[in-house]
Image (cartoon, rainbow, N blue to C red):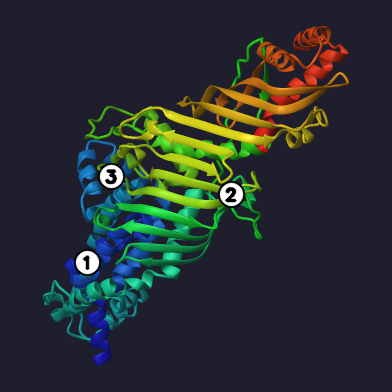
Amino acid sequence: MKLQKLIRAFLGEASPTQIILASLIGAVLGFMPGFSQAGGLIVSLCILLLVLNCNLALAGLIEIVARLLSLVLLPMSFELGRLLLDGPTQGLFILLINAPVTALFGFEYYATTGGLVLGTATGLLMGYFLSRWVTGLRTRLAQAEANSDQFRAITGNLAVRFILRLLLGKIPTSDYAKLLDAKAKPIRIWGVILVLALIPTVYFSSGWIDGPAARSLIQSNLARANGATVDLEAAELDLATGRLSLQGLAVADPKALDTDIFRADRIAVDISTSDLLRKRMRIEEIVVEGGSHGKKRQVPGQLNQPPPSDPPKADSQASVESDSFDLDENWRGRLQQVRVWLDKLSNHSSGNLPRGASKEPQAQEPSGPDPLLDEWLDREIQAQGRVHVSADHLIMGAPLLQIDRILAPGTTTTLMPDERLDIQFENLSTQPHLVEVGPSLGIQSESGNLDLAIALNGASAKGGNNHLRLVLTNLPAEDLAGSLEAISGKVRGGSVDLRAEGNIEDRDGAWIDFPVAITLKDSSVRFSGREIPISRLEVPVQLRGPIDDLDIQVDQNALVTSITKAAAGALPGAALGMMGDGLKKATGGVSDKVGNEAGNILGGLGGKDGVGKLFGR
């Protein structure tokens, strides 16, 4: 008897109101896409389920049915979310998405907002018809005499027995009239006590987040953002002090799954938790220890979403006076990943967001289909699926995640095995168009031979130019030439410097069109059987095209002049004149002995196997 009372207290009341509430909450829970998309909403619904005296078993059954139904109706939920978030009710959802507490509900996700409405409608319909059926069943049982043939026929039905046990925890043999007239208590007392007890319990036991829970959450989110496997050995989170520590992070390269695009022994994070109720997190500083790039993985990673397709090669439009060469394939793959990152940042800038994505978006009047919005949504759906697509253009005030500074001293890379790099990122965020200063990257080698600076001001709230500066100095010229078949053994000693600076244009991706100065210093070139000392040889180069599909254009007339000047004083006048004539014939396509050798040197320094390999060193 006590067990039956306990079961009934746990299940809750089975009045028509409680049946409708149980169906409503269970159906909405079933239509929620996931905790990472609707965490606050799911927690709130579970609290309501405990506090309101609705039937828990019925809510669980309805949730299972609704979950299966939501998989089939996901496209409908998504389109309904589009209507609400990008339609006439946009202003309301802007308030909800950016307000404290409701910001945690995940209304910016199309599937969450659409699922809330579709789940509400489904739950009300199921609850209404189920409550009518249960009321009719109780009436029939109340009218039938106990142990009569009619009573036994009704209670012998498997569906009726299942519903009775589900709602009441037992199959009563009498007193159905009392059940029909009973007044349900609206609040579950033990549910209120449990919720009140959970609040301090969660607060004081936040250390539970340390360990497997934090590691799993961080690992899954990083893997989704990366598009491929992310390994993480351990994670420790201390909300009281705002400290996060990660150990053994390894991020697989989506373009080369047998290598890690980034690896770190330890990462220390300082977090500001002042705005968590608005689902905003600001990380003041991240310090990386033991960082590396390009190391081989023991177990190859796996893609968790389709890799981005390689863009078509752009027309270089090289002039007649210049030669056009492709960049080295090793670096081309790396630069494709850079372009993906730059595209992600530029897609969040105010100029490339869908309708309503201004710096301070306003509610939109219905004005028919927006082709730019449709195209953007199609790309996002193909890349990550409907469940993960969110209307980030409705996020205002501050980004969901902002990282002020990332420091990674002493990082190693297989691209420069003899160097240790100091890397610094600043102003990284999920919505850079809400930050006054754009993202930036600085990389300097400890030897001083590498200095790279990228500033993406075009993605910031103030706007501006996306700027690139690259300086490579003291590259060993002889080692470089030794790796090039065309000029192997023809260059001795000396060094090579490279300097490039200009703006990165947003033209169908990250586009570069600026000069690069390549200088050969204090070297010698073997030419027509003679060793020609070169104190300084400047190779004029123009970089043009998308950052991952660059054309390297060499102005050969200017190069002829540069080589002639570099050889001045090292050769007698007649030999110098012959060299100049040979260089001009080489650039004009004449195949004589001198011209061929000059062409080889030109190709080595400025062509596909020259400048391209220079980048690959």
At a point 21% along the width and 64% down the height, the residue shown is 21
- Say whether marks 2 and 1 touch (CB < 8 Å): no
Q: Position of residue 171 (x, y in %)?
A: 28, 83
Q: Amino acid at mark 2?
A: Arg
At a point 20% along the width and 43% down the height, the residue shown is 92
Q: Amino acid at mark 3?
A: Ala
User: Considering the image in quadrants, where does the C terminus appear?
Assistant: top right
Instruction: Give the class, few, some or many, for how many residues have Cα within 10 Å of label 3's Cα (few <14, many ≥20).
Output: many
- Nearer to the camera, 285 or 89: 285
Q: Position of residue 312 (x, y in %)?
A: 59, 28
The residue positioned farthest toward the bottom in the image shown: 1
- Which element carries disc 3, helix, strand or loop? loop
Quarter holding residue 153:
bottom left
Residue matched to label 3: 398
Q: Is residue 607 visible?
A: no
Residue matched to label 2: 420
Q: Is residue 190 visible?
A: yes
Gap between marks 2 and 1, in whole Å? 56 Å
Badge 2 or badge 1: first in the primary sequence: 1
**Is 171 located above or below residue 423 in the figure?**
below
Q: Amino acid at mark 1?
A: Leu
Badge 1 or badge 3: first in the primary sequence: 1
Instruction: Give the class, few, some or many, for how many residues have Cα within 10 Å of label 1's Cα (few <14, many ≥20).
Output: some
Gap between marks 1 and 3, in whole Å? 31 Å
- Which element carries disc 1, helix, strand or loop? helix
Residue matched to label 1: 48
